[in-house]
Amino acid sequence: MFNPGKFTIGIDDAGPVERDRMWLLSVTSGEMYGGGMKVNPGAKIDDGLLNWAMLHGVPRRALFGLVFLVRSGKHVGKPGVLMGTAARLSVDAPEGFPCHVDGDTVRVTYPVTVRVLAGALPIVVGGTG
């Protein structure tokens, strides 16, 4: 069974903050993932920022209802849901806490840092004939 953990999170240059009973920390560049889960409504993929959403301090029984709200982005402002933007996040979580990258579970050694690398991915847009 999945259990929450104690995280230490640093956002940009702010000092680290501890969050107890953390269920999820999602870091995205866009607003959706997982086949339409609107985890970070309003996120802009080209603004040079990471968007983060965390869920902490809520009882297990509240999780099921929140999942349905995420589909439409209506989880924003609910108890235990915090959201924001950053250029860099550092995350320390309990050893073995699951980490997913683009839908795949990956092994990580905490702490990890996530940051924006502006211009790191060239994109070519072609016209239609």
Image (cartoon, rainbow, N blue to C red):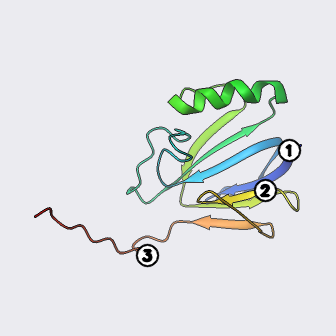
Badge 3 local density, few (<14 within 10 Å), some, or many (20+)?
few
Badge 2 local density, few (<14 within 10 Å), some, or many (20+)?
few
Q: Earlier in the sequence, mark 2 or mark 3?
A: 2
CA gap, disc 3 and disc 1: 35 Å
Question: Which image quadrant: the C terminus?
Answer: bottom left
Q: Residue at x 24, y 67 (%)?
A: 125
Badge 1 local density, few (<14 within 10 Å), some, or many (20+)?
few
Q: Residue at x 43, y 75 (%)?
A: 120
Q: Position of residue 42 (x, y in %)?
A: 43, 40
Q: Secondary structure at mark 2?
A: loop
Q: Earlier in the sequence, mark 3 or mark 1?
A: 1
Quick check: marks 3 and 1 in contact, CB under 8 Å?
no
Quick check: marks 1 and 2 in contact, CB under 8 Å?
yes
Q: Position of residue 43 (x, y in %)?
A: 45, 45
Q: Residue at x 78, y 42 (%)?
A: 23
Q: Position of residue 107 (x, y in %)?
A: 77, 68
**Residue 93 can be seen, yes or no:** yes
Residue 98: numbered disc:
2
Above or below residue 122? Residue 51 is: above
Q: Nearer the viewer, residue 112 or 16?
A: 112
Q: Amino acid at mark 1?
A: Phe
Q: Nearer the viewer, mark 3 or mark 1?
A: 1
Residue 2: numbered disc:
1
Question: Which image quadrant: the N terminus?
Answer: top right
In the figure, is residue 41 to the left or right of 56? left
Residue 4 placement: quadrant: top right
Q: Amino acid at mark 3?
A: Ala
Residue 65 placement: quadrant: top right
Residue 54 placement: quadrant: top right
Q: Amino acid at mark 2?
A: Pro
